[in-house]
Image: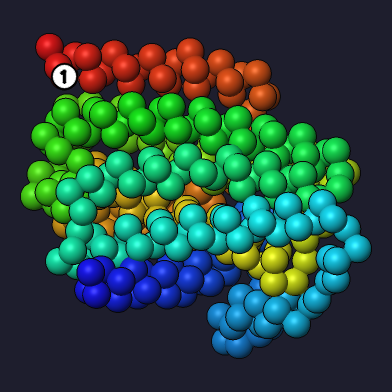
């Protein structure tokens, strides 16, 4: 238990350090994709820009006591932080001696609470556009959960269990059985993390910022950082279930953030009805048919 807790704390610290440079890399790539430079003033070639932005946001402060509905939004922020901490505990526990036999299922349990946090955050923004964006994001999380549950069942049938530590020795098994599962998992992660082309929580960017409109300072930092931590954890999860835990999985772990940056720089936002139809009429039936074929 102690080893699992220590590994979880280390996993959280490593995730926070990775996203600091991931944000910097994303801003650099987005800048060069638009024929302009990214951050390059703070530190050597801008390496300290993320830390400077963090310090600036931490010292900002907003009083919430005169708006009763804001407490619901703050509860959503704290709930999202707790979910990210649980993600990091499961991620860090992978490298400890106290890993659970049903560790893969714990990801589904934690994911099921994401829609509640998004709804609370959107409701506390005091903007109907933010609330609509939060509702769309929450429904996207439900769509992701349905597909993710099918992925878990498929992996459980292929590997004979739900312990991610056992997948280390069977790396590449699923990729040989059903290669399209890798693409489907990437699409699901883009949906869960509200990334382009499924960033419906911020699709009214010309009017408001999205479900995080009324948040500033440390609360905005938490919302911003939590999304990137989830990206990193799920990138690792795909690498673990598709290729195990070897050097090829490590290479794919660094490839996934680059693919997310490329998607944000190049892909347009998909129409919402196309998104719903694709998830419920194409992706989910493909996953269901795939694990029925494995059973037979």
Residue 5 in view (yes/no): yes
- Quadrant of res 48: bottom right
The image quadrant of residue 178 is: top left
Residue sitting at 70 percent across and 64 percent down? 220
Q: Residue furthest bottom?
A: 43
Instruction: List x then y, in percent, for residue 260.
Output: 50, 48
Image position, residue 253 (x, y; %): 33, 55
Q: In this rendering, is residue 247 above or below 145?
A: below
Residue ID for mark 1 = 294
The colour scheme used to paint the residues is: rainbow
Residue 183 seen from this side: no
Residue at left 68%, top 82%?
Answer: 55
Q: Residue at x 15, y 31 (%)?
A: 158
Mark 1 is surrounded, within 10 Å at the Cα level, by few (under 14), some (14 to 19) or many (20 or more) other residues, namely few
Above or below — where is 263 with respect to 3?
A: above
Secondary structure, mark 1, is: helix
């Amino acid at each position: 238990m102690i080893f699992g807790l220590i590994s979880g704390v280390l996993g959280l610290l490593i995730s926070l350090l990775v996203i600091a440079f991931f944000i910097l890399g994303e801003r650099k790539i987005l800048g060069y994709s638009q024929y302009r430079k990214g951050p390059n003033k703070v530190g050597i070639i801008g390496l300290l820009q993320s830390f400077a932005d963090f310090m600036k946001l931490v010292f900002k402060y907003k009083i919430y006591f005169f708006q009763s509905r804001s407490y619901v939004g703050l509860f959503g922020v704290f709930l999202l932080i707790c979910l990210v901490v649980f993600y990091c505990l499961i991620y860090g526990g992978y490298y400890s001696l106290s890993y659970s036999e049903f560790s893969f299922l714990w990801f589904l349990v934690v994911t099921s609470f994401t829609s509640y946090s998004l709804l609370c955050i959107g409701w506390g923004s005091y903007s109907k556009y933010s609330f609509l964006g939060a509702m769309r994001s929450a429904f996207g999380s439900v769509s992701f959960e349905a597909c993710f549950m099918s992925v878990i069942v498929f992996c459980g049938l292929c590997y004979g269990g739900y312990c991610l530590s056992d997948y280390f020795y069977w790396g590449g098994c699923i990729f040989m059985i059903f290669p399209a599962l890798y693409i489907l998992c990437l699409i699901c992660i883009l949906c869960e993390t509200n990334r382009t082309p499924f960033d419906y929580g911020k699709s009214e960017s010309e009017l408001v910022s999205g479900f995080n409109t009324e948040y500033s300072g440390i609360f905005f930092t938490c919302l911003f950082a939590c999304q990137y931590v989830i990206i990193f954890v799920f990138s690792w999860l795909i690498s673990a279930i598709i290729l195990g835990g070897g050097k090829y999985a490590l290479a794919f772990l660094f490839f996934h953030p680059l693919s997310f940056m490329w998607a944000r720089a190049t892909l347009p936002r998909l129409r919402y009805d196309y998104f719903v139809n694709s998830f419920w009429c194409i992706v989910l039936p493909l996953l269901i048919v795939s694990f029925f074929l494995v059973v037979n």
